[in-house]
Structure formats: C-alpha cells, structure tokens
Image (cartoon, rainbow, N blue to C red):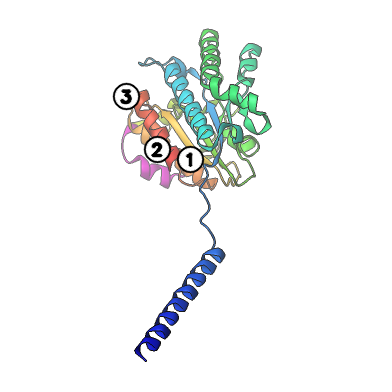
C-alpha cells in the first residue's frame, strides 16, 4: 500500500513540474522581448560666426578654438557611425554660415563641409569615416585664413537664421533623428542687414547697444530688462525637436556682467521659440570645451 501511495505521489509531482515548466515556456513565448537600444541617428548643424570676433587677441586664437570645436563634433559623428556600424549609419553633419560668404572661394569650400550618409553607399561612407575630421579641419583653416586676410566683417545674422532658415536646414522630420544645432559665437549678435528695433526689442546685441542703453552703468540689469522689456525681437517661430548649444560666448573683459546679460537675452529668445533647455557656454580652454560637448551628447 505504501508503495502504491509513493508511486502516486511521484507521478503527481512529475505531472505538476511538467505543467509548470510548460506554462513557463508558454509565458516566455508570449511575453515581449526587450528591444535592443540602438544609437540615435544624428543630424548636426554648426553655425559659425565669422565676424571680427575671430581676430580678438586670445590664446589659443579664436580660429583655433572654433576649428577644434568642429573637430570634436566630427569625432562625435565618427563615434556614432562606429557604434551603429558605419555602413548602416544615416547621420548628417554640416557647417553653415549666415549669410553665405560672398567670396566664391570661401563659398566653394563651405559647400564641401556637409555630409549626408543617407545618400551614400558603403564605399563612400568608409571614405567619410576615414577622412571627415581632416577634411573639415583643412577646409575651415582655409576659410578662416581667407576671412581674416579679407578683413570684411559683415557680421553673423543669427537672428535672421532662426527666423528664416532653421526649420528647413536643421530639422529632420524623421523622429529617429536627434536634431542638434551648435552655434559658435561670442554672443554679440549683429549683421548689417538686421538692424530692426521695436521699442526695446532688437534683432541684435552689440557692445555699443549695451553701452547706449545703460547696461554698463551698473545697477540691477535684470530689473532693467524686465521693467523696460528688453530682449531680442520675436521671430514668430515655434521650433520643435531641436536641441541648441551655444559655445564661445565671450563678453568684454571690462564688462563681465555682459556674459550674464547675453545669456539672459538668448535664453528668453529661445523660450519664445519653444526651444527647450538650451545649453550656453562661455569661451574656455579647448580641453574644457571638448568635455562640455561630450557631456551634451551623452544627455
């Protein structure tokens, strides 16, 4: 009798284990598997300010700092290609100037500082991976040399760029892309064709303007901005799916408060365009700027 009971118990136990195992297998087969996280496709636009900021006395020179920034961005671009597999990458990167340079030689070089992997075959992508940093550096060195030698400082029309161009040139509608705009400027915005003013809203920020408006006299500049409604003119644009980083803000050494004033102007302006969490950095040693760029792309 005991043997029969033992046999029945073992049979029941085996049946239960088998049923449980089958249930686990069935459950595993219907539960969704966690998808592998793939690196995002990058769409990087770089706007360079070729105003007289490039001849301000500093070491390393402003030209060297700008070129190293672009070099770091091409390094980020290459690393992203490598992470997803160079041949599968559809990333994009371009250097932009607003307005386009009048010098045909500079303009021809600038046209070569643009890469769109989505339109390339495997051989072309391999060439980009191997040469993009060198090609961009050589092109920019030539552009900066010619610009400095020409001494033709028309300014950089950042305000009109956001008004007319940013949506068309910097934003991919495909949601798989991470759209990033990097602006390299000292923060003093000026162009000879953008001198608009409506009351205390302007399309420019210049040292002379800040001097004439009393921002250099001391006092509470924040209260002045708020009470007298100072700021950049609205572009009447609402911009979505764009991350903005501004590098190399460089206020006058004798008026260091202007660094904060410039950032306040820019932050308010970006908020007006619905650009979330813009990142603004002052000029610094290239190694520190490199670190900030790395942190930005990790975020």
Query: Which of the two marks, 3 or 2, is nearer to us in this view?
Result: 2
- Do the CB atoms of the residues marked 3 and 2 lie less than 8 Å apart? no
Above or below 226: residue 207: above
**Range drawn in magenta:** 217-230
SS at mark 3 in the image:
loop
- Residue 156 rendering spot, x and y as whole percentages: 55, 25
Label 1 to label 2: alpha-carbon separation? 29 Å
Q: Is residue 204 visible?
A: no
- In this rendering, would 210 be left or right of 123? left
The residue singled out by tag 1 in the image is 231
Query: Pointer 1: residues within 10 angstroms few (<14), some, or many (20+)?
Result: many
The residue singled out by tag 3 in the image is 254
- Residue 8 rendering spot, x and y as whole percentages: 42, 85
SS at mark 2 in the image:
helix
- Residue 17 rendering spot, x and y as whole percentages: 44, 74
Q: Nearer the viewer, residue 54 or 243?
A: 243
Choose the circle earlier in sequence order: 1 or 2. Answer: 1
Choose the circle earlier in sequence order: 1 or 3. Answer: 1
Q: Is residue 222 magenta?
A: yes
The residue singled out by tag 2 in the image is 295
Please give the name of the residue rendered at 60% of the width and 47% of the height, measured from the top-left corner.
175
Label 3 to label 2: alpha-carbon separation? 30 Å
Q: Is residue 238 magenta?
A: no
Query: Pointer 3: residues within 10 angstroms few (<14), some, or many (20+)?
Result: few
């Amino acid at each position: 009798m005991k043997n029969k009971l033992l046999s029945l118990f073992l049979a029941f136990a085996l049946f239960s284990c088998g049923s449980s195992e089958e249930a686990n297998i069935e459950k595993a087969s219907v539960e969704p598997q966690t998808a592998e996280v793939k690196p995002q496709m990058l769409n990087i636009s770089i706007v360079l300010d070729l105003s007289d900021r490039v001849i301000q006395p500093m070491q390393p020179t402003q030209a060297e700092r700008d070129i190293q920034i672009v070099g770091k961005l091409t390094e980020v671009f290459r690393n992203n290609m490598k992470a997803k597999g160079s041949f599968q990458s559809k990333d994009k990167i371009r250097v932009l100037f607003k307005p386009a340079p009048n010098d045909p030689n500079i303009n021809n070089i600038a046209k070569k500082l643009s890469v769109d992997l989505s339109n390339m075959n495997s051989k072309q992508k391999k060439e980009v991976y191997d040469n993009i940093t060198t090609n961009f550096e050589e092109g920019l060195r030539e552009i900066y040399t010619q610009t400095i030698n020409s001494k033709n400082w028309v300014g950089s029309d950042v305000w009109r760029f956001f008004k007319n161009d940013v949506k068309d040139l910097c934003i991919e509608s495909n949601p798989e892309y991470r759209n990033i705009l990097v602006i390299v400027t000292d923060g003093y915005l000026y162009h000879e064709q953008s001198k608009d003013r409506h009351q205390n809203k302007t399309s420019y920020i210049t040292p002379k303007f800040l001097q004439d408006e009393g921002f250099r006299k001391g006092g509470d500049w924040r209260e002045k901005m708020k009470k007298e409604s100072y700021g950049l003119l609205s572009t009447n644009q609402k911009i979505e799916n764009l991350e903005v980083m501004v590098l190399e803000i460089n206020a006058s050494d004798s008026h260091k408060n202007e660094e904060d004033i410039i950032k306040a102007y820019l932050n308010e302006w970006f908020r007006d365009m619905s650009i979330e969490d813009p990142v603004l950095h002052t000029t610094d040693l290239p190694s520190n700027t490199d670190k900030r760029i790395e942190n930005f792309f990790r975020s």
